[in-house]
Image: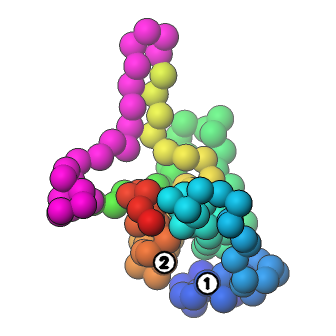
């Protein structure tokens, strides 16, 4: 199925060949349950939207796309600021994106965020 036709969690699961019922996270602390569920969904959604493509982290010339959500300040979030990269100078470390949530193209990344925004926002904000 063309990734552009995949717009619901049920379609993602059908394409992946898995049950659309979300796994139980009852054994995790309540404040982490939605986040853990969103992590699971985001990995599955990304795999399906990428249609089998896997990033090659040995190839620095291969472009990889990660979703970037802008977080607005409100009463719960006093700051709209967030990090997407980190750099440490006592022993060099540089991180850009998580390996399981990279998209093959800008169009695929935009399709994912436009159709599954609620999942990816939970990941970025870590909210209940």
What is the number of the mark on residue 126?
none
> In the rendered image, which quarter contains the N terminus?
bottom right
Image spot of residue 47 (x, y percent): 67, 66
| Quarter of image, res 114 | bottom left
> Residue placed at 33% from the left, 42% from the top?
83
Q: Are marks 1 and 2 in contact (CB under 8 Å)?
A: yes
Position in image of residue 49 (x %, y %): 60, 73
Question: Which quadrant of the figure has residue 22?
Answer: bottom right
User: How many angstroms separate mark 1 from mark 2 (CA)?
Assistant: 8 Å
Residue furthest top in the image: 90
Look at the image and give the residue range highlighted in magenta.
71-92
Relative to 10, residue 23 above or below? above
Label 2 packing within 10 angstroms: few (<14), some (14-19), many (20+): some
Q: In the image, 73: left or right of 112?
A: left
Question: Which SS class for mark 1?
Answer: helix
Is 100 situated above or below 105?
above
Decide whether residue 63 is among the magenta residues: no
Q: Residue at x 72, y 71 (%)?
A: 24
Of the numbered discs 1 and 2, the one sitting upstream in the chain is 1
Residue 42 image position (x, y, % from top left): 58, 66
**Disc 1 target residue:** 9
Query: Which residue is label 2 attached to?
Result: 116
């Amino acid at each position: 199925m063309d990734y552009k036709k995949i717009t619901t969690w049920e379609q993602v699961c059908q394409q992946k060949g898995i049950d659309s019922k979300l796994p139980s996270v009852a054994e995790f602390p309540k404040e982490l349950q939605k986040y853990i569920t969103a992590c699971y969904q985001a990995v599955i959604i990304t795999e399906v939207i990428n249609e089998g493509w896997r990033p090659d982290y040995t190839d620095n010339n291969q472009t990889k796309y990660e979703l970037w959500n802008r977080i607005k300040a409100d009463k719960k979030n006093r700051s709209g600021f967030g990090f997407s990269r980190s750099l440490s100078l006592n022993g060099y470390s540089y991180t850009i994106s998580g390996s399981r949530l990279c998209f093959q193209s800008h169009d695929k990344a935009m399709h994912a965020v436009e159709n599954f925004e609620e999942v990816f926002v939970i990941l970025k904000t870590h909210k209940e």
